[in-house]
Image (spheres, rainbow, N blue to C red):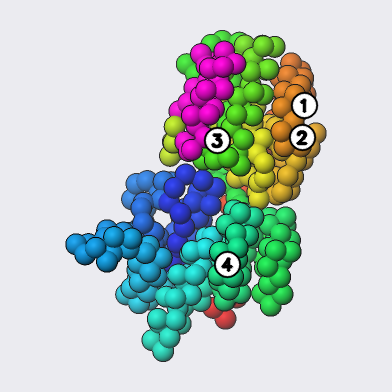
Amino acid sequence: MKIGITCYPTYGGSGALATELGLELARRGHEVHFITYAMPFRLGEYTERVSFHEVDTTTGRYPLFEHYPYLLALASKQYEVALRERLDLLHVHYAVPHATTAWLAREMLAGKQRLPVITTLHGTDITLVGQESSFYAITKFSIERSDRVTAVSRFLKDETVRTFGCTDCHIAVIPNFVNPAEYHPGATDCRDGLAPAGSKVITHVSNFREVKRVRDVVRVFARVRRAMPAVLLMIGDGPDRGDAEREAHELKVDADVRFLGRLGSVANLLQATDLFLLPSQTESFGLAALEAMACGAPVIGSRVGGLAEVVEDGVSGLLEPPGSVEAMARRAIDLLRDPGLHEAMRRAAVDRASLFSADRIVPQYEALYRETLG
C-alpha cells in the first residue's frame, strides 16, 4: 500500500507514534509518505520506502499572506502528494487540524482519485482543543467525516463519544506500541558515567507542558533524594521547563537534576533508569511510560485516563491521584529500598510492555487499512 501520514513533527507522543508507525509499515513493505511542516523528530536518517514532503509555510512577498494559513497549505500539499504518488489512503494523527485538512484534500480529489481518510485521536485534540467552544464544531465534523477513526485507549474512545456524540462513526481502539528491537532492558554497564556509583537513576520524558506537571516530578525527586543518593534525568523541552528548573533550585536539588533537552533517541537512558516518573494531570495513553517499561523501568504515575490501561498498579508500576506528591515519593522510596520488590516490578514492567509490541499492534492498523480500502 501507498500510505500518506500527517502528524505533528514536534516532541510528543502523537508525533512519536505516527513516526514509529510509518517506519514499521515501511519495514513491512509499504510505501510511506510523511506530509508535514518539518521532519518528524524520530524520522532521522534515510529509510527505504519512506519519503518526507515538507509543507511550505513561508508567507511570500505579499502583506495579504502575512498570516498565511498553515491548514490550507497542508491541505494543498496532501492533495498534491496524493495525486502525484497515487496514495491509497491518508492516515492523519490529531483531529484538528489534520483530519480537517485531509477532508479538504479528499474533496479536491473528487472525480480524480479515491482517498480514504483514517484519523487517529491521541488525547489533547479531544480533551483540550476539541472542547474549546471555537473548535468544537469543526472537531466533531472532522471526526465524523473521516472514513475510519481510531483512539489510542478505551478511555479516549469513551471521552470522544461522551464529548462529541459521534454516534454515526465507529471508533476502533488501537493502542500505542513499542519496538522491542530498540526498547528493551540494557546491559549491566548501561549506566556507566550516568550517575555516581550507588545512586538511583530517576527519569522523566515529556514535552514539558502544564498537563505533565513537571514541577511535581522535581518535588517527588527531592523527597527521594533526601532518602538516598539519586539523580534525575529530565528529557524533553517545553513551556514549563523554566518552572521545573526553578523548582529544582528552590528545593536545593539542582546539582542532581540534569535537563537534557530534546533527544531523538532515549532508549539507552531508559535502560539505565531505576524509576520513571509520569505524574501528569491527564494521560490518554502514556507512550513514554510504555517505552520506559519495555526497558525495565517501573513507572510511578497518575491514576488517570489511559495510563491505567498500560500500568498495572502494584504489579508493573504504581499509580496515585494527580498531585499526590507525598504518596508518590513515599512509594518510590519504598520501592527503591527493596531490591526484591524492585526486581519483580521491573520484570513485570517488561512483560506488560511486550503486550504492546509493534508486532502485535501494527498488524491491527494494516487490517484497518485493508478493510477501509475494501
Q: Earlier in the sequence, mark 1 or mark 2?
A: 2
Of tags 1 and 4, the one toward the viewer is 4
Name the disc covering residue 139, or none.
4
Name the spot of residue 90 as percent of width and height, x first: 47, 70
At label 2, counting other C-alpha atoms closer than 10 Å, the crowd grade (few under 14, some 14-19, many 20 or more) is: some
Residue lying at 27% horizontally and 66% vertically, measured from the top left: 64
The residues bearing labels 4 and 3 have C-alpha atoms spaced at a distance of: 28 Å
At label 4, counting other C-alpha atoms closer than 10 Å, the crowd grade (few under 14, some 14-19, many 20 or more) is: many
Question: Which quarter of the rendering shows the C terminus?
Answer: bottom right
Q: Earlier in the sequence, mark 2 or mark 3?
A: 3
The residues bearing labels 2 and 4 have C-alpha atoms spaced at a distance of: 32 Å
At label 3, counting other C-alpha atoms closer than 10 Å, the crowd grade (few under 14, some 14-19, many 20 or more) is: many
Front residue (pair 252, 275): 252
Of tags 2 and 4, the one toward the viewer is 4
According to the image, label 1 marks what residue? 327
The residues bearing labels 2 and 3 have C-alpha atoms spaced at a distance of: 18 Å
The residues bearing labels 1 and 4 have C-alpha atoms spaced at a distance of: 38 Å
